[in-house]
Amino acid sequence: MTEKQAQTFDPIEMSSQQFELASCYIGELRTGLIDFLKHPKRISIVNFPVEMDDGSVQSFQGYRVIHNTVFGPGKGGIRFHPDLTMDEVISLAKLMTWKCALVNIPFGGAKGGVICDTKLLSESELRRITRRFTSELAANIGPNIDIPAPDMYTNEQTMAWIFDTYDVLHPGKNNRPVVTGKPIEMGGSFGRHEATGNGVYHLTERFLSKGLLADQQTVAGARVAIQGFGNVGAVSATTFHKNGALIIAVSDSQGGIYRQSGFDPAELLAFKAEHGTVVGMPDSLTLTNDDLLQVDCDILIPAASSHQIHQNNAHNINARVIVEAANSPLTPEADKILSERGIYVLPDIIANAGGVTVSYFEWVQNQINQQWDLDEVNTRLQKTMHRVLDLVFSRWQGFVVGEKTATNDTDSKNIDLNKPVFRSIALSIAIERVAKATLIRGIWP
Ligand code: NAD
């Protein structure tokens, strides 16, 4: 399935199905509250003109969605992608709400992006798009309102442009906390660039230590396949490799490669920097992206785009654990098929939460004008990832051993509620926390 076809999935419907299933593991939720938690608080749509390098003018559309602010200002990435849709941004903003609640940071969920193909744009065109988009968002972003971060096809440079534009428009204040994922020289945090990939590693190592895979209780020796070799995929590859895993397959938007004896990620990075893709790496077999997902491996890490594993290919997955570094790489149908096949899935809301965790550390450092050293950031990150895995795992275990029972019935999907997937349990904890905080704050007026 190509990336374009993958977008035909309905992201709102999928997040509703996940929400419904998760609510089976929650004591009680008031109906009106459920509706409130399902829908975004605010949606901004902006259209703006940009002058291109050849003197022509092109119109762009961008979105920023805040899903929930019960715990604090909005937080979430900005994505530049030709297939971006508002529905996808809404569902990603929701994910951010649950992710922030799970790792216990005082942010709500948000997400945004611009429909554009960065591969067809020059650096100066990208800078003009970013600046104009930032100015169009106007008062909708701010250090205590909504704080963007990098996501697909945006990076530290994009964040520096957003900060600079915002700072010019709001002089005389400490505006550094308006975005995270900035370059170190501009108030970025040590360890932020690597945070999501490192977090994927810390979560996986903790999961393996629980012993569900009797013969694979550490990452050492595990055969790992990674879809996507951008920021998150490449850092994950590097960290897993450093800790003894074999990176047997990786891919990017142009295709995949396989080597049974494993790749050195440093060599892959050098090859990609020279050739623009990992495809063609010496001593490797070339794969399609669908082949990559079906490689026989211990750990499969989707680290590219949404809806890559679905009802048509979930039966062919040959991994023992899937760790969702990307946001929403699996559809609910895939969740069900994989669960029936005994393949564990560590869901995005915990697996890639390292990014927002260190974004929060960056925001705190900016607020107090400090820069923590790398060890401090990494130690805090590791603790957070281990804590969130422990939290979700022990609640999951409670349902599996029958100490807890599902409270609601779902008629629709023929799902055995006594065999919950980690996603439902993680979501149930997050939804419960946000619901409880909403009631404690008191519904206004
Ligand atoms: P990126 O733009 O740096 O990298 C994306 C990579 O995916 C590129 O290598 C691209 O070639 C590849 N790719 C795109 N389509 C593909 C396809 N169909 N098959 C295989 N490869 C494909 O983006 P990123 O920041 O690494 O983000 C990757 C995923 O991780 C996204 O889903 C994003 O939402 C999620 N995520 C990122 C962060 C972060 O801190 N950057 C945090 C949380 C979640």
Image (tube, rainbow, N blue to C red):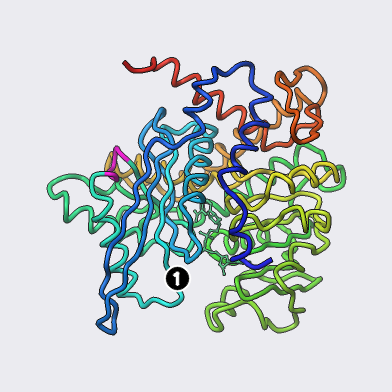
Residue 111, x across and y down, in percent: 43, 48
Region of the chain picked out in magenta, as a range: 140-145
Residue 316, x across and y down, in percent: 83, 58
Residue 424, x across and y down, in percent: 67, 33
Q: Nearer the viewer, residue 35 or 100?
A: 35
Residue 189, x across and y down, in percent: 39, 51
Query: Residue at (57%, 60%) from the top-left corner?
Result: 235
Left or right for 345, reference 54 = right
Q: Is residue 353 visible?
A: yes
Q: Quadrant of ligand 1?
A: bottom right
Q: Quadrant of residue 260?
A: bottom right
Q: Quadrant of residue 120?
A: bottom left
Residue type pointed to by label 1? Asp
Query: From the viewer's perspective, is residue 54 above or below residue 305?
Result: below
- Magenta residue check for 143: yes
Query: Residue at (73%, 67%) from the top-left corner?
Result: 290
Which residue is the extreme one toward the left? 172
Left or right for 121, reference 27 = left
Main secondary structure of the magenta stretch: loop
Query: Residue at (81%, 31%) from the top-left corner?
Result: 416
Q: Secondary structure at mark 1?
A: loop
- Around disc 1, counting alpha carbons within 10 Å, would you say few (fewer than 14), some (14 to 19), or many (20 or more)? some
Query: Which quadrant does the C terminus fall into?
Result: top left
> Which residue is tagged 1?
117
Q: Nearer the viewer, residue 146 or 222?
A: 146
Query: Which quadrant does the N terminus fall into?
Result: bottom right
Q: Is residue 267 visible?
A: no
